[in-house]
Image (cartoon, coloured by chain):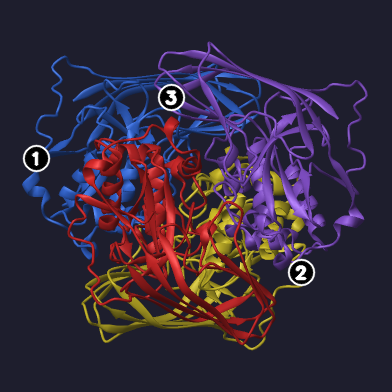
Chain colours: A yellow, B purple, C red, D blue
Amino acid sequence: MKFKVYSELSYEVFSPTTFIFNIQAAKSASQKVISETLIVTPFIKFEEFTLKNSDTRFVKMEVEQGVFFTVIYEAEVEVSYTVYDEKVLLKSIPIINLDHEVLPFISPSRHCESDKLLELATNEFGYLPNEYAKAKAINEWIFNTVEYKTGVTNSSTSACDTLLDRVGVCKDFAHLGIALCRALDIPARYFTGYAHNLNPPDFHACFEAYIGGQWLFFDPTKLAVANGLVKIANGKDASEVAVASYFGDVTCTFMKIDCNPVVSDFIPFNSELDTKAISYE
Amino acid sequence: MKFKVYSELSYEVFSPTTFIFNIQAAKSASQKVISETLIVTPFIKFEEFTLKNSDTRFVKMEVEQGVFFTVIYEAEVEVSYTVYDEKVLLKSIPIINLDHEVLPFISPSRHCESDKLLELATNEFGYLPNEYAKAKAINEWIFNTVEYKTGVTNSSTSACDTLLDRVGVCKDFAHLGIALCRALDIPARYFTGYAHNLNPPDFHACFEAYIGGQWLFFDPTKLAVANGLVKIANGKDASEVAVASYFGDVTCTFMKIDCNPVVSDFIPFNSELDTKAISYE
Amino acid sequence: MKFKVYSELSYEVFSPTTFIFNIQAAKSASQKVISETLIVTPFIKFEEFTLKNSDTRFVKMEVEQGVFFTVIYEAEVEVSYTVYDEKVLLKSIPIINLDHEVLPFISPSRHCESDKLLELATNEFGYLPNEYAKAKAINEWIFNTVEYKTGVTNSSTSACDTLLDRVGVCKDFAHLGIALCRALDIPARYFTGYAHNLNPPDFHACFEAYIGGQWLFFDPTKLAVANGLVKIANGKDASEVAVASYFGDVTCTFMKIDCNPVVSDFIPFNSELDTKAISYE
Amino acid sequence: MKFKVYSELSYEVFSPTTFIFNIQAAKSASQKVISETLIVTPFIKFEEFTLKNSDTRFVKMEVEQGVFFTVIYEAEVEVSYTVYDEKVLLKSIPIINLDHEVLPFISPSRHCESDKLLELATNEFGYLPNEYAKAKAINEWIFNTVEYKTGVTNSSTSACDTLLDRVGVCKDFAHLGIALCRALDIPARYFTGYAHNLNPPDFHACFEAYIGGQWLFFDPTKLAVANGLVKIANGKDASEVAVASYFGDVTCTFMKIDCNPVVSDFIPFNSELDTKAISYE
């Protein structure tokens, strides 16, 4: 499935500032970037980089005081995903047999204090028969008990806050999903990307849980179509893959995000959600 | 109903210390202290006092460094309570018509941060048809989701902690019940007292919610028989009516608490709990 | 010293709402209300009340959905205060000898979690030679380390939050002062009132510490002139004496507060602050 | 400098449990493991692994219910370190020029919520002239204001907790140091290792700050000799490099840790600390 993604971010810069962006589509076996452009207006020198052993694509630049600038990213991306039937997902992999690279995603992280939620997660979801049932129940529970509301949470909000406050935006929903999965020893990670038809338009954050050997996709906001996403990056949580980090005094003055299928015959994946799951790998 | 209550508290005192105890049975229209003695061994001068507009009975004393001492309180107390049928409890009193003295019990307090729980309480219990149904559901929910466990919480633990940790002792259960009621605009207060057949034996903490013009009794631990209590005091939470406060370096070395009906024909109130409620006023 | 105080509060009411206001000047031995008027426009029936054993003057009213209304309070108030010399303030009163009515103000409260700050307060201020030195150092420390900034904190913010965040408004400064005093066993209470020349104009919040038998006045924001205040109320913290509490869906659309000396020869008390303290009792 | 390190850990296992240990000396350009043995008694199959792009050496094993077992690790390790003079350390590297692999260590992590401490860190340490002065002042401040005390904190304790509670053990000291450095945009990471003459004997935790292009070593507990350590691992915080993680019901029944220089002429590095710093790279 081909998508066109577009993001436009404008900033006013009040002090010399280093920016680190993470807005480019991920490149992986299941996601090919057919074409892309990144334009900074007025021109500011930028550098792309990735960390060792990570596919996350960062762009960094140094911006002087007093500058207004805009970053525009456009890409055409071929995304493939796999649909798994619930039956396949019933098998559980003991921790001892997990791929080593998956293990860090059982540990707590800045915004996902799973270590504090062992009792709560076990009490609410521990009785369920398998990991897929647990992750699905967590996803539904968040959707049903947390109110989607912008402007209430901030970049310091974490899963424990959201459990008490019961309000937040997509990143808060995702952090809570991740924390509750990890509290049940289910590896889980943050997923940031472009989402088709997201309303309000923005970057989207969801989560993936490692079940039956697959990273399965979950969106506790239910704001996006499950097969309408283009991945930017995975990470332990938003602290590792923030869309934009800056070190300086800055205001974001404009933001436009878009994500559309190239072909007209896009079929939203939805009705089968109860018994089937999607993996973006 | 007549009860004999007994408490014995021993302390080792490592620095000059002021003690304030709150262990004597309350005196009220519905609770008569027939006889009582308070003995401090070895003898230390103590003073009884109450605060203006409060029935809470405090005892204070100054203890020198190096002293081991024991406080023994014994009393025979006549307790009366009223049983209310659910039908009576369906009527709700608008806040504007509440007795003024009840209003402070809607506000948050040290251990009952109801102001943080408006969304959560509304989401979990707001759909219920009346205040009695809400308070009863809160009581059941705490009983079902919080594990009774000693040694995990301390005197700083509050309702938000317990909501996340899901473990605690009677005071933690009570604080959570109070916080959730207040978050729904139901006045609620802390109840500390002696409880018959409590296991492990200790002072007990429960809560009361003001519904239909009555202070109804709730025990989310379900460890005590609802009509087997002798009240020591009410307060906003444990910070106002702690059993023992001390200003100094002290260890409690021994504790024995007892509460028994004087007559042999004590009939535990229990089976009717679903449709009837008890008020200790 | 005579002051004219004025407050005007306008609200838009989106659901049937009970309001409880606490905006009238306190009446006490040291503060006489010479004249006052409270007007609600358009007229809504209101009721004044005080709680037993409290001087706090509340006004409550029930407002229907869809109403816009304004409360205007005007008063002329004679305020007297006492100036204490530091020498008088050096004597410490052991807890055992404190007036009983003062004792509740050593306990923690909703926004002043002194029980969590024993180590911190002792570490930072415990070395100081007497209670007045400690309270004064706390006041200076808050002024120097907390930034005054509106719009960052909310009605759930408490002393521990402010200790970490280091930003807030007058109530947050006051709560932190109270919590740190209580952590050192110095009774402390919240003071809400009208302040002369406050900028931005608003109700003001400060704190009082009980030292040498007096309730001494402290303003860690240093935004008000120490002898330019008209007290509305004291309480354990803002949870007991909020300017306006409402139970419903409401927006405050306008606010005007004023406080001016009637005579032209008002002499601000300031230069002597280092060795003299004010008590509003 | 050659050291012999020894650790012995015994566990009683109450349910089938997966263990992941991280107790082996790190292998790096500046630290050579000359010889080592890892023995599990009674024998349990274990597997060593490292994550991609990480030197951290993990050992995992699956242990059945009812087993008592002991892990003994012994090694002889050649450690080298570099001493830097303060003058070298004065130069600051702008974020834009930092090695990319260092960037993740500016972000907050589970136990180091630097994002919450920007104001506090700037207020307390921001005035200092360079990054080395800031990190050194942070180290001193923690040593002076936090009390070393075992049994008060647990594996969920984080920097914000320690800032309020002012008590903790080496990992809590390290987390606070890391959080405060990151809040000032100084990259900082957790250091876990064996320490000579540590009292009480245990694994040790310290931190490293990236200053002037070097990872400089800091120990805010001041319990270890700065040149008496053998590194086990670095990580964002303890959540990434815990000495022992287990998924199951387990009690640690015995622990013995030792670390001694092989040669008798070991010269503790200490007196020069004011103007010189150590890097273990």
Judging depth in this view, the residue of B88 and D93 nearest the camera is B88
What x and y, as percent, mark residue D148? Answer: 34, 30
Circles 2 and 1 in contact, beta carbons < 8 Å: no
Residue lying at 55% horizontally and 41% vertically, measured from the top left: B239
Q: Secondary structure at mark 3?
A: strand
Mark 2 to mark 3 CA distance (whole Å): 69 Å
The quadrant the N terminus of chain C occupies is bottom left
Judging depth in this view, the residue of C183 and C271 nearest the camera is C271
Amino acid type assigned to the residue bearing label 2 in the image: Glu
User: Where is A53 relative to D276, above or below?
Assistant: below
The quadrant the C terminus of chain C occupies is bottom left
Residue D191: tell me if it is visible: no
Mark 1 to mark 3 CA distance (whole Å): 46 Å
Near mark 1 (Cα within 10 A), the count class, few <14, some 14-19 or many ≥20, is few
Nearer to us of marks 1 and 3 is 3
Tag 3 residue: B17
> Circle 3 marks a residue in which chain?
B
What x and y, as percent, mark residue B94? Answer: 75, 66
Nearer to us of marks 2 and 1 is 1
Tag 1 residue: D275
Circles 1 and 3 in contact, beta carbons < 8 Å: no
Near mark 3 (Cα within 10 A), the count class, few <14, some 14-19 or many ≥20, is some
Tell me: D57 left or right of A222: left
Tag 2 residue: A272
